Amino acid sequence: MIESVRYPSQCSGCGSETECVGVQALVGQRLEWDIGYHCPVCDDASYECGPGGSRIPDDLRRRLLAEHGEARLVLSDPLAGPAVVMKVLRAELGGELAEAKAALQQIRAGVFAGTMPEMTLLVHRLRTAGVKAAAERAEQCDEASAPC
Ligand SMILES: [Zn+2]
């Protein structure tokens, strides 16, 4: 599971416009990210990456969501024990009980979303805990055609 986005950026060496590639990937059971570019003018290259489990930069995450749209986490089993789901959420999101509770409510309301690699990882975790879940690509709003 991998998502990537290309976007214009500026070379830190010579200031020319160059193209950056940002990636978020689910490798095994860990999320990784990297951002890199190679300047065609001065041959400068930059590469930045986050090892498994490190937090993705907000800017890259925003770009991925804008490019690919959000993925929603859906519990296929609506009767799944909330305690089990919340335990998985807490372990994964690293939050407090109240945050896990809020996340569970968002999932049930169908509004808990993130990048596809992030949701895919949560689905893995939930399935491992015995909860049936799926990641679905949310409907994308196409501004060119009809309003949502
Ligand atoms: Zn350059």
Image (cartoon, rainbow, N blue to C red):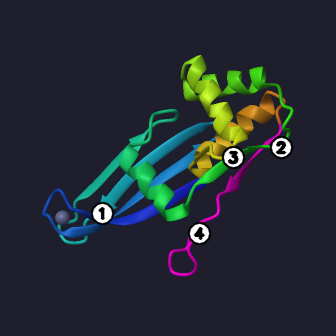
Query: Which of labels 1 and 4 is toward the front?
Result: 4
Quarter assignment of residue 141? bottom right
Callout 3 amino acid: Gly
Is 10 in front, or is 102? 102
Query: Which of labels 3 and 2 is toward the front?
Result: 3
C-alpha distance separating marks 4 and 3 = 17 Å
Q: Is residue 33 magenta?
A: no
From the Cβ of disc 1, is ligand 1 less than 8 Å away? no
Q: Is residue 4 something that shows in the picture?
A: yes
User: Of the numbered discs in the image, which one, if any, rests on residue 76?
Assistant: 2
Q: Earlier in the sequence, mark 3 or mark 2?
A: 2
Do tag 1 and tag 2 residues touch (Cβ < 8 Å)?
no
Kindly identify the residue that appears in the image at 58 percent across and 78 percent down.
146
Q: Earlier in the sequence, mark 3 or mark 1?
A: 1
Asked which secondary structure carries label 2, the reply is: loop
Is 32 in front, or is 145? 145
C-alpha distance separating marks 3 and 1 = 40 Å
Callout 1 amino acid: His
Callout 2 amino acid: Ser
Asked which secondary structure carries label 4, the reply is: loop
The residue indicated by pointer 3 is: 110
Q: Earlier in the sequence, mark 4 or mark 2?
A: 2
